[in-house]
Image (cartoon, rainbow, N blue to C red):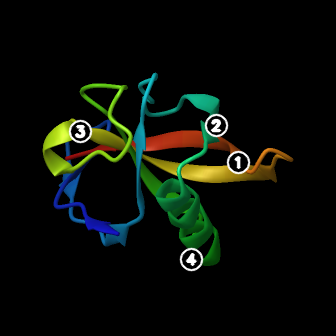
């Protein structure tokens, strides 16, 4: 879980949000209003998705600076990301998870 201090709305207003589970993305950037599948294989990211499903299906997705890093730290990810809603989750036979997400708000 990570506490997101600011979310930016389309009308220019800002709001303070609660804590959200965080998933670093290796090879993509998610923008607000974008719907895309996200394939997750790291156990920590799968736990974050599971936690989000148990709460309100909201998750915070950020892009890694270097996709080669297997266990990124705070310094290895960008500080601006997107709050997204999980619309569908599918557990694959190889142990990975495919989540269909829809970006809603940009956050920092």
Q: For marks 1 and 2, give the CA distance.
A: 6 Å
**Does the rendering let one see residue 29?**
yes
For marks 3 and 1 on the same chain, the one whose residue lies earlier in the sequence: 3
> Residue 65, image x and y in percent?
24, 27
On the image, numbered disc 3 is attached to which residue?
Answer: 77
Q: For marks 1 and 4, give the CA distance.
A: 18 Å
Closer to the camera, 20 or 11?
20
Question: Within 10 angstroms of label 1, few (less than 14), some, or many (20 or more) residues?
Answer: many
Question: Within 10 angstroms of label 3, few (less than 14), some, or many (20 or more) residues?
Answer: some
Tags 4 and 2 in contact by the CB under 8 Å rule?
no
| Element class at badge 3 | loop
On the image, numbered disc 1 is attached to which residue?
Answer: 97
Q: Quadrant of residue 10?
A: top left
> Residue 44, image x and y in percent?
47, 60
Residue placed at 50% from the left, 39% from the top? Answer: 103
Judged from this view, the residue extending furthest toward the left is 75
On the image, numbered disc 2 is attached to which residue?
Answer: 39
Give me the disc on residue 55: 4
In the rendered image of this protein, does residue 87 appear above or below residue 26? below
Tags 2 and 3 in contact by the CB under 8 Å rule?
no
**Does the rendering let one see residue 9?**
no
Q: For marks 3 and 4, give the CA distance.
A: 24 Å
Residue placed at 38% from the left, 40% from the top? Answer: 70
For marks 2 and 3 on the same chain, the one whose residue lies earlier in the sequence: 2
């Amino acid at each position: 879980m990570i506490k997101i201090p600011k979310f930016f709305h389309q009308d220019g207003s800002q709001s303070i949000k609660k804590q959200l589970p965080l998933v670093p993305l290796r090879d993509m950037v998610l923008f607000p209003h974008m719907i895309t599948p996200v394939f997750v294989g790291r156990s920590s990211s799968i736990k974050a998705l599971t936690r989000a499903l148990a709460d309100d299906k909201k998750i915070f997705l950020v892009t890694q600076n270097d996709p080669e890093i297997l266990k990124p730290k705070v310094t290895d990810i960008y500080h601006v990301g997107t709050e997204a809603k999980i619309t569908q989750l599918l557990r694959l036979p190889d142990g990975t998870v495919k989540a269909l997400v829809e970006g809603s708000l940009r956050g920092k």
